[in-house]
Image: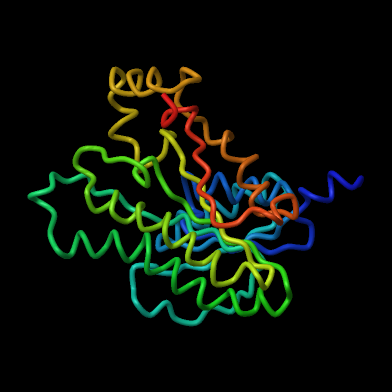
């Protein structure tokens, strides 16, 4: 392995990935596993977690499941002490502004903000003691702009951008960096209403500079970069992986 390869290698690292059972969380987990990391996948749905672990094992990626309800204020006992934390769990109920209940609003805040905050509180001290850690949050195009019927989601993702900066400010001097990826439109369970509407999906693709919507593999390079030694001097940043949607 040459010096450049070592910069991007995650051999010997452990990554704790919330929402790692599907969609963007699973895509990022796969990327980190392909770069050499051992994975702990956490989400509420045990059967989906088991399928994700088996899928990754079939690709030669070591992973284990940790079922966890990340919407609860008490996250319970977590034995893991990872080198990398990826906060990918999320929800978007897609309700008109006037129909959002307090419970629905609180669910968005719990998953997008409280859980990443509490997991960082739990894991960052041990990362700092080792002098190395990576925290990767998942923002959104709605970290920067609004879309219809997504007010709580957008508020949460706007908060993710600021939480990313706050974590970076608190921990980066101790070797623990924090950054976020803001994905454009990718085919996941959360975006199924978009991709099930072919004209709408095509219109969104046309809004990008590249001319297409994302494929989950488009997230691999950015995730590995931000979680590796290659990004040692990058912290507090929100990287839009959106095909140039925000630029156009």
- Occupied quadrant, residue 150: top left
Report the number of numbered marks: 0
Which residue appears at 43% of the width and 23% of the height?
208
Q: Position of residue 198 (x, y in %)?
A: 31, 20
Query: From the viewer's perspective, is residue 72 above or below residue 181?
Result: below
Q: Quadrant of the C terminus?
A: top left
Which residue appears at 69% of the width and 55% of the height?
233
Q: Residue furthest left?
A: 98
Query: From the viewer's perspective, is residue 169 above or below residue 240?
Result: below
Which residue appears at 31% of the width and 40% of the height?
145
Q: Position of residue 113 (x, y in %)?
A: 37, 64
Query: From the viewer's perspective, is residue 2 above or below residue 243?
Result: below
- Occupied quadrant, residue 170: bottom right
Towards the viewer: 174 or 65: 174
Residue 227 shown left or right of residue 137 in the figure: right
Q: Residue furthest right?
A: 2
Which scheme is used to colour this image of the protein? rainbow
Which residue appears at 29% of the width and 49% of the height?
154
Towards the viewer: 241 or 1: 241
Q: Position of residue 96 (x, y in %)?
A: 13, 44
Residue 4 shown left or right of residue 154 in the figure: right
Q: Position of residue 227 (x, y in %)?
A: 66, 54
Residue 197 shown left or right of residue 218 in the figure: left
């Amino acid at each position: 392995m040459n010096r450049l390869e070592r910069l991007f290698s995650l051999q010997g690292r452990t990554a704790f990935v919330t929402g790692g059972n599907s969609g963007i969380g699973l895509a990022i987990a796969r990327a980190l596993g392909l770069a050499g990391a051992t994975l702990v996948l956490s989400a509420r749905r045990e059967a989906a977690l088991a399928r994700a672990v088996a899928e990754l094992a079939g690709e030669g990626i070591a992973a284990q499941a940790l079922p966890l309800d990340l919407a609860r204020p008490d996250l319970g006992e977590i034995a893991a002490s990872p080198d990398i934390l990826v906060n990918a769990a999320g929800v978007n109920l897609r309700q008109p502004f006037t129909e959002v209940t307090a419970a629905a609003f609180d669910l968005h805040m719990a998953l997008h903000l409280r859980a990443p905050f509490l997991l960082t509180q739990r894991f960052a001290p041990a990362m700092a003691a080792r002098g190395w850690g990576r925290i990767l949050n998942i923002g959104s195009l709605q970290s920067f702009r609004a879309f219809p019927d997504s007010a709580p989601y957008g508020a949460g993702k706007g908060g993710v951008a600021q939480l990313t900066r706050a974590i970076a400010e608190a921990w980066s001097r101790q070797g623990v960096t924090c950054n976020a990826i803001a994905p454009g439109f990718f085919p996941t369970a959360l975006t199924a209403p978009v991709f099930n509407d072919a004209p709408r999906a095509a219109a969104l693709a046309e809004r990008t500079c590249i001319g297409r919507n994302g494929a989950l593999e488009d997230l691999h390079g950015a995730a590995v970069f931000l979680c590796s030694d290659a990004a040692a001097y990058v912290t507090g940043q929100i990287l839009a992986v959106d095909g140039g949607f925000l630029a156009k």
